[in-house]
Amino acid sequence: MLMADDGKSEHFPRLPLNTGEISADKPSLRPFKKHILICTGPRCAPETSLDVYQYLKEQLKRLGCYDGPERIARSQCHCFGICQMGPLAAVYPDNVWYCHLTKEKVDRVIQEHLLANKPVEDYVFYKS
Ligand code: FES
């Protein structure tokens, strides 16, 4: 955790602008194959969603999914505006949505969808 000049903690460091190394005009993310977002908001499944997200993080790390241009990105979201059937997850760029996630379902989503590119139809509640 970084500390600001006033001694208060900062979750996100202030990046130097116009240094030549980091351009505020052209921000970008490292390339990734897929991005999975899980809602850990207060109305979906607050008793399980954070555990499911932590499990996802651990499994992606264990499987070495965070490196290279084919990496899997993951994010924790506060709310998708759906607020039921949680824990919810969305996988992009596929726009496939999963509901009622458990650790066991996360294993299948990782193996079949994120790594093998085949959505787990048993758990999909929306896709386009
Ligand atoms: S709290 Fe999860 S979608 Fe709103």
Image (cartoon, helix red, strand yellow):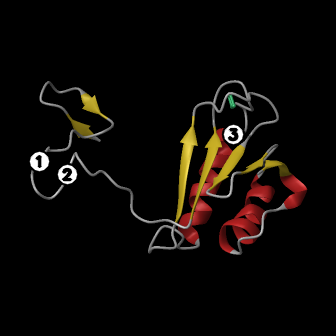
- Coordinates of residue 53 in the picture (x, y in percent): 63, 47
Is label 1 in a helix, a strand or a loop?
Answer: loop
- Quote the CA–CA distance across marks 1 and 2: 6 Å
Q: In the image, what residue occupies the spot 19% across and 51% down?
A: 23
Most distant residue in the right direction: 122
- Coordinates of residue 57 in the picture (x, y in percent): 57, 56
Is label 2 in a helix, a strand or a loop?
Answer: loop
Amino acid marked by disc 3: Ser
Amino acid marked by disc 2: Ser
- Coordinates of residue 112 in the picture (x, y in percent): 76, 70
- Quote the CA–CA distance across marks 3 and 2: 35 Å
Q: In the image, what residue occupies the spot 77% across and 69% down?
A: 118
Please tell me the numbered disc located at residue 49.
Answer: 3
Residue 76 placement: quadrant: top right
Whether ligand 1 has any atom under 8 Å from the Cβ at mark 1 is answered as no
Identify the residue under disc 2.
23
Is label 3 in a helix, a strand or a loop?
Answer: helix
Q: Is disc 1 in contact with disc 2, using a CB cutoff of under 8 Å?
A: yes
Of mark 3 and mark 2, the one earlier in the sequence is: 2
Whether ligand 1 has any atom under 8 Å from the Cβ at mark 3 is answered as yes
Q: Nearer the viewer, mark 1 or mark 3?
A: 1
Left or right: 16, with 43 as reference point? left
Please tell me the numbered disc located at residue 46.
Answer: none
Identify the residue under disc 1.
18
Amino acid marked by disc 1: Asn
Q: Residues within 10 Å of mark 3 (few under 14, many from 20)?
A: many
